[in-house]
Image (cartoon, grey):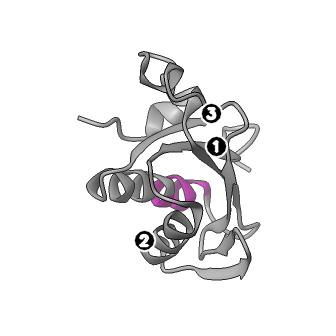
Amino acid sequence: MGIYDSLYCKIFIDSECDMDFLINKINELVSGQKKLFRTIDTEFGELDVNKNEDFDSEKRCIKPNGFLYSRYYLDVEPNEQIEQEDYIANISKLLQDLWKSDFEAVAACDFEEELPSKA
C-alpha cells in the first residue's frame, strides 16, 4: 500500500449548486463513468458524492474548520491496482480542477500534506 495506512480521501465541497449539477461536473472533470445515482468510477478510484449531514450555512464560513460544514463531500476510494503516487496526483488534479471551477474544496486524508493548497 505504501507509506500511508489508508489512501481513503474525503473531499469537502461547498457550493450553492444542486447535487445533480455537482455530480455531472465532477464526472466531467475526472472523465469518469457514472455508476449509480451518486457514484462515479474513474481510472484512479471510485467517488461517492454525498450531502453533508453536518451542513451549516453559517458555520461553513468560519475559518479554519468551516469546511467541515460544507454542503457536500466526496468519499474517494482508490482502485486496487493504482500506484500510490498516481492516486495522489489524481486527487491533486481533482482539487485544482474543482478550484478552477469555482468550488470551495478541502481534502481530509492521511496524505493531505502532499496535496496542493488553494492559493
Main SS of the magenta part reads: helix
Left or right, 46 with reference to 69:
right
The stretch of residues the image draws in magenta is: 84-90
Category of crowding for the residue at label 2, using alpha-carbon neighbours closer than 10 angstroms: few (below 14), some (14–19), many (at least 20):
some
Of the residues shown, which amino acid type is indicated by label 1? Lys
Please check the rendered image and state whether residue 87 is part of the magenta-colored stretch, yes or no: yes
How far apart marks 2 and 1 lie (CA) works out to 17 Å
Q: Residue at x 52, y 54 (%)?
A: 85
Camera-near label (3 vs 2) is: 3
Circle 1 residue = 10
> What is the x, y in percent for residue 52?
67, 41
> What is the x, y in percent for residue 5?
76, 37
How far apart marks 3 and 1 lie (CA) works out to 15 Å
Above or below, 106 against 56 in this view is below
Circle 2 residue = 29
> What is the x, y in percent for residue 105?
44, 43
How far apart marks 3 and 2 lie (CA) works out to 24 Å
Helix, strand or loop at disc 3?
loop
Of the residues shown, which amino acid type is indicated by label 3? Phe
